[in-house]
Image (cartoon, rainbow, N blue to C red):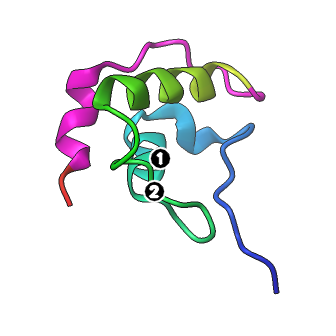
Amino acid sequence: AGAIYPSLADNPRMGTAVYPIYIIAHGKGGMPWFRDMLSAEQIAMVTTYLRTHFGNAFSEPVTKAEVEPLLKR
């Protein structure tokens, strides 16, 4: 069986920034975590990009302040 990755494309769960921030920061299934490789600002930019592309239409930008509390282990 192959690795299972969380769906980030055309996903209604992307409507709240918490879901993709948590997935990017902490990983899920076969997707690795990036909290040790990306800054809070970088995670905010990636999250904003994912929420506005790939069939997602959530245009509210994600901020560094939204990301920082979710980086805690």
In this rendering, the count of numbered labels is 2
Relative depth, front residue between 46 and 15: 46
Farthest bottom residue? 1
Q: What secondary structure is marked by label 2?
A: loop
The quadrant of the rendering that contains the N terminus is bottom right
Q: Quadrant of residue 64?
A: top left
Residue 59 as seen in the image, left or right of residue 25: right
| Residue 56 in the image: above or below residue 4 | above
Q: CA distance from mark 2 to mark 1?
A: 6 Å
Q: Quadrant of residue 54?
A: top right
Identity, as a three-letter code, of the amino acid under mark 2: Trp
Q: Are marks 2 and 1 in contact (CB under 8 Å)?
A: yes
What residue does disc 2 label?
Answer: 33
Relative depth, front residue between 34 and 17: 34
Q: Quadrant of residue 66?
A: top left
Q: Residue 5's mark?
A: none
Residue 55 magenta: yes
Residue depicted at 43% across the width and 13% down the height = 61
Identity, as a three-letter code, of the amino acid under mark 1: Ile
| Residue 14 in the image: above or below residue 57 | below
Magenta-highlighted residues: 54-71
The quadrant of the rendering that contains the C terminus is bottom left
**Where is residue 65 shown, x and y percent of the image?**
20, 24
What residue does disc 1 label?
Answer: 24
Farthest right residue? 1
**Where is residue 33 shown, x and y percent of the image?**
45, 56
Residue depicted at 68% across the width and 27% down the height = 56
**Where is residue 2 shown, x and y percent of the image?**
80, 79
